[in-house]
Amino acid sequence: MFTILIVEDDLPLQRMMSAFLGLNGYRTVTADNGAEALESIERILPDLVIADVMMPVMDGWELTRELRRAWP
């Protein structure tokens, strides 16, 4: 099953995306910010990350930089 990590601080939007993707056969995992996503990404090993750009703690740009640095 294809796993998608949704990194979004707007909870209603996060839930809507997760529900829509789940109804279309994807396994979804959510995180509220980039730091939370990084903490769980090795355990999750997602196939795709959908990240909001403007989030507290660690934004989507910084998360992307960290992911590229860790997994070139």
Image (cartoon, rainbow, N blue to C red):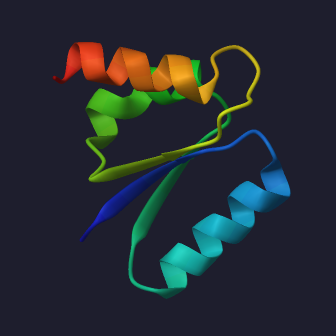
Q: Tell me the quarter of the image containing the N terminus.
A: bottom left
Q: Position of residue 54 (x, y in %)?
A: 74, 30
Farthest residue in the left direction?
72
Q: Please state if 65 lies on the left or on the right of 17 as rendered.
A: left
Q: Depth check: 59 or 33 in front?
A: 59
Where is residue 33, by image quadrant?
top right
Label count reads 0
Looking at the image, which residue is at 76% across and 20% down? 56
Q: Position of residue 60 (x, y in %)?
A: 58, 29
39 relative to 37, above or below: above
Q: Please state if 15 lies on the left or on the right of 31 as rendered.
A: right
Q: Please state if 46 lies on the left or on the right of 28 as rendered.
A: left
Farthest residue in the bottom direction?
24
Looking at the image, which residue is at 28% across and 22% down? 68
Q: Position of residue 59 (x, y in %)?
A: 64, 22
Looking at the image, which residue is at 39% across and 73% down? 26
Where is residue 15, by image quadrant?
bottom right
7 relative to 21, above or below: above
Where is residue 19, by image quadrant?
bottom right
Q: Tell me the quarter of the image containing the C terminus.
A: top left
Q: Please state if 2 lies on the left or on the right of 22 as rendered.
A: left
Q: Position of residue 64 (x, y in %)?
A: 43, 26
Looking at the image, which residue is at 33% across and 23% down? 67
